């Protein structure tokens, strides 16, 4: 698959479609009978929205016009029921969404966004990010060629959601952003008014690492037992200027319909959602950072057991998220008689260390740098928690980063109880000491039985 250099936006003159409902006056058609999409969108958005049903009409018209189907978002049952519970939407929130969307030519006069390559960074003013988020809500955007859906919010609209509570939380986060969006078209270059998306590769930073990596002292590492997982670690107040949180990502980063950590962290930060438009699949030595995307809520729990509470406006400051995809070890099998976990194969350990080193090298930070991480690459990815955290510890030590390991007190205390004494035993050690342990581990080692 060829990755384009740019992602094309709806205001591009090259983006055209049939005017199926004769919305535009005559004279807009080209030789193929197509009309430019942008005048169509602006005309559709002129329709008044006094009731939720009016919005659904607009979304269906957009879907039928741009995608030639009304089935993209199903019956819109979840969206309609959700908005019916928010009576201020039509009068307060909708005008802000519409106006933000209509500013596309102002914010993006080139009608495109560069697709990230390693070493690249896309910097968006908050108004620009809100503009793209508005179009994700309206479903006016083209699917990036590397994605199979999950690039706009149509996935949250139909009845019969697999996790309706999660979807309603993500829609609440979206409404919260636009409820307080200033009704202006500001241009502000202050760093705290920007969202930064950057792609990094191990190849680009390998030469900056110490030559004798084994001699690096082991970084501080602490295990925290949590009553519940929360999104507090993605808040700037928690991280501080030099902190970050690891997002256990898929190689196709982004939001979704359930409540994995990645889906929660991205869904809670609408300004992070546009990253799916210009971030190609992560390769084995790639990591994505998103800095400045503001969390709207404080979400507690994961999977089926989640809840949320409002986040005060002053606490809605975006920190730094490190998107790292782990190996899917359920697809790898131990060779007969090998006696070792797939996690411990040298090529697999190298891959995970390089991935984490790339993420932990992605920013300089101010003073002490600290990363919060859950049991990355475990769960659905089937990694062994002890091995994964040892590999993370190696990477953190190679990059002079301290680590907070977040464990659930009910379901992951067994790991914590074994790993904490192990860490104490290596106190004052070096990377080469930890690598020696990894090289000596076998499948039946007690440390791995968690």
Image (spheres, helix red, strand yellow):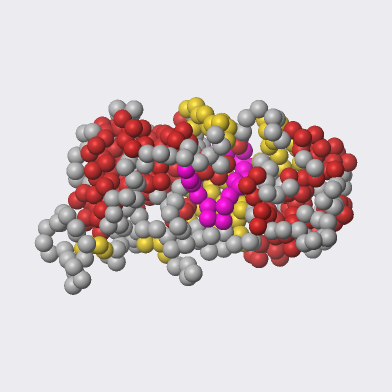
> What residue is shown at x 57% (from left), y 52% (from top)?
250
Query: What's drawn in magenta, residue-wise?
Result: 234-257
- Asked if 179 appears above or below 8 in the picture, the reply is above
The answer, for residue 206, to whether it is visible in the render is yes
Q: Quadrant of residue 161?
A: top left
Instruction: Compare residues 156 and 226 and report the one nearer the observer.
Output: 156
Please indicate whether residue 409 sits to the left or right of residue 174 in the image: right
Q: Position of residue 13 (x, y in %)?
A: 27, 65
Give yes or no for residue 239 being in the magenta stretch.
yes
Q: Residue at x 22, y 55 (%)?
A: 40
Up-down: is 177 above or below 16? above
- Count the marks: 0
Q: Nearer the viewer, residue 285 or 122?
A: 285
- Res. 227 image quadrant: top right
- In this rendering, does residue 134 appear at all? no
Q: Quadrant of residue 55?
A: top left
The residue shown at (35%, 55%) is 141
Q: Return the x and y of residue 450 as percentages of the image width and height.
A: 77, 40
Picture layout, residue 430 above or below residue 373: below
Is residue 289 rendered to the left or right of residue 157? right
Asked if the magenta segment contains residue 350, the reply would be no
Up-down: is 340 above or below 161?
below
What x and y, as percent, mark residue 310?
A: 47, 27
Q: Position of residue 157 (x, y in %)?
A: 37, 42
């Amino acid at each position: 698959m060829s990755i384009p250099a740019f992602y094309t936006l709806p205001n591009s003159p090259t983006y055209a479609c049939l005017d199926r409902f004769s919305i535009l006056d005559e004279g807009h058609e080209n030789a193929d009978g197509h009309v430019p999409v942008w005048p169509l969108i602006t005309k559709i958005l002129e329709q008044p929205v006094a009731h939720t049903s009016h919005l659904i009409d607009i979304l269906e018209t957009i879907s039928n016009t741009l995608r030639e189907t009304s089935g993209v978002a199903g019956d819109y049952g979840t969206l309609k029921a959700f908005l019916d519970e928010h009576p201020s939407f039509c009068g307060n929130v909708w005008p802000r969404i519409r106006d933000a969307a209509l500013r596309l030519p102002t914010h993006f006069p080139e009608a495109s966004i560069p697709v990230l390559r390693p070493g690249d960074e896309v910097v968006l003013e908050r108004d620009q990010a809100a503009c793209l988020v508005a179009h994700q809500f309206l479903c006016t955007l083209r699917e990036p060629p590397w994605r199979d859906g999950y690039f706009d919010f149509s996935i949250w609209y139909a009845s019969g959601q697999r996790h309706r509570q999660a979807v309603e939380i993500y829609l609440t986060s979206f409404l919260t952003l636009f409820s307080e969006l200033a009704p202006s078209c500001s241009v502000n270059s202050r760093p705290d008014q920007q969202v930064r998306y950057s792609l990094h590769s191990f190849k680009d930073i390998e030469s900056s690492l110490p030559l004798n990596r084994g001699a690096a002292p082991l970084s501080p590492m602490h295990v925290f037992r949590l009553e519940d997982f929360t999104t507090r670690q993605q808040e700037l107040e928690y991280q501080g200027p030099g902190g970050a949180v690891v997002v256990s990502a898929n190689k196709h980063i982004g939001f979704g319909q359930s409540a994995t950590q990645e889906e929660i962290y991205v869904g809670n930060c609408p300004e992070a959602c546009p990253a799916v438009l210009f971030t190609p699949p992560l390769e084995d030595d790639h990591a994505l950072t998103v800095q400045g995307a503001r969390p709207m809520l404080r979400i507690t729990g994961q999977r089926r057991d989640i809840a949320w509470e409002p986040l005060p406006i002053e606490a809605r400051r975006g920190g730094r998220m490190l998107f790292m995809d782990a190996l899917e070890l359920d697809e790898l099998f131990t060779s007969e008689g090998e006696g070792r976990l797939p996690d411990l194969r040298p090529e697999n350990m190298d891959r995970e260390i390089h991935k984490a080193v790339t993420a932990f090298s992605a920013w300089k930070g101010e003073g002490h740098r600290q990363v919060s991480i859950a049991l990355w690459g475990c769960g659905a990815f089937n990694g062994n928690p002890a091995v994964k955290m040892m590999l993370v510890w190696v990477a953190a030590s190679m990059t002079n980063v301290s680590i907070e390991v977040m464990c659930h007190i009910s379901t992951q205390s067994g790991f914590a109880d074994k790993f904490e004494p192990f860490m104490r035993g290596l106190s004052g050690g070096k990377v080469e000491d930890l690598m020696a342990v990894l090289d000596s581990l076998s499948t039946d080692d007690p440390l791995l039985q968690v």
